[in-house]
Amino acid sequence: MRIATQHIEQHQYTIGQLAKVAGVGVETIRYYQKRSLLPTPEMSSGFRLYSSALVDRIRFIKRAQALGFSLDEIAHLLQLEDSRDRRAIRDIASERLAQVRAKLNDLLKMEATLSQLIEQCSASSTDVQCPIIQALNTSAQ
């Protein structure tokens, strides 16, 4: 309970505290700063103090990554975060959805091929090369 109270009262964190509260490593925060996804605060009394609002921003970034958005796309989404340009936001999400669907299609093809090869391997004689190995040795056409 004390940590939650500090979070409400403190409103500023060292980089280590911010990382812990946001559930990421310090190097992740530094990398996000390098990529301009997070600001780098000025030094104050020998420390950089980070706003507690950055916890939500880091969580936004992590959720967007979990949905497959690249850091460049996330940077664009963050730029649009306070805008009313829903079309631009939808366009980015629609492009990501198209990429996801293409990957799903590729995965379904891979699943069908592997399933077929496993079935052929089970049904084939041990006197011939396994169809899985044979397929992997065959050049793509």
Image (cartoon, rainbow, N blue to C red):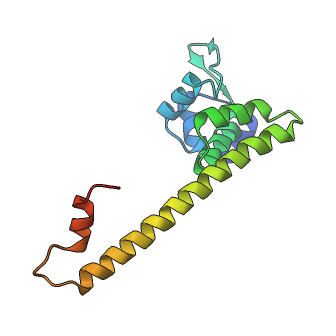
When asked about the image quadrant of residue 35, the answer is top right
Residue ID at (53%, 41%): 24
Question: Would residue 24 appear left or right of 89 to someone viewing this image?
Answer: left
Q: Residue at x 13, y 82 (%)?
A: 126
Classify residue 69 as left or right of residue 89: left
x, y (%) of residue 109? Answer: 47, 66
Give me the residue at 32% from left, 82% from top.
Answer: 119
Residue 55 position by quadrant:
top right
Residue 130, given in percent of the width and then of the height, sits at: 19, 74
Q: Nearer the viewer, residue 114 or 129?
A: 129
Q: Quadrant of residue 70?
A: top right
The quadrant of the image that shows the C terminus is bottom left
Q: In x, y percent, where is residue 104?
A: 55, 61
Residue occupying image coordinates x 68% and y 45%: 95
**Looking at the image, can residue 1 be seen?**
no
The foreground one among 106 and 16 is 106
97 vs 33: above or below: below
Q: Residue at the far right: name it.
A: 84
Q: Is residue 13 visible?
A: yes
Residue closer to the observer: 41 or 36? 36
Q: Is residue 117 above or below residue 33?
A: below
Query: In the rendered image of this protein, does residue 69 appear above or below residue 47?
Result: below
User: In this picture, is 125 found above or below 134?
Assistant: below
Residue lying furthest front in this view?
Answer: 141
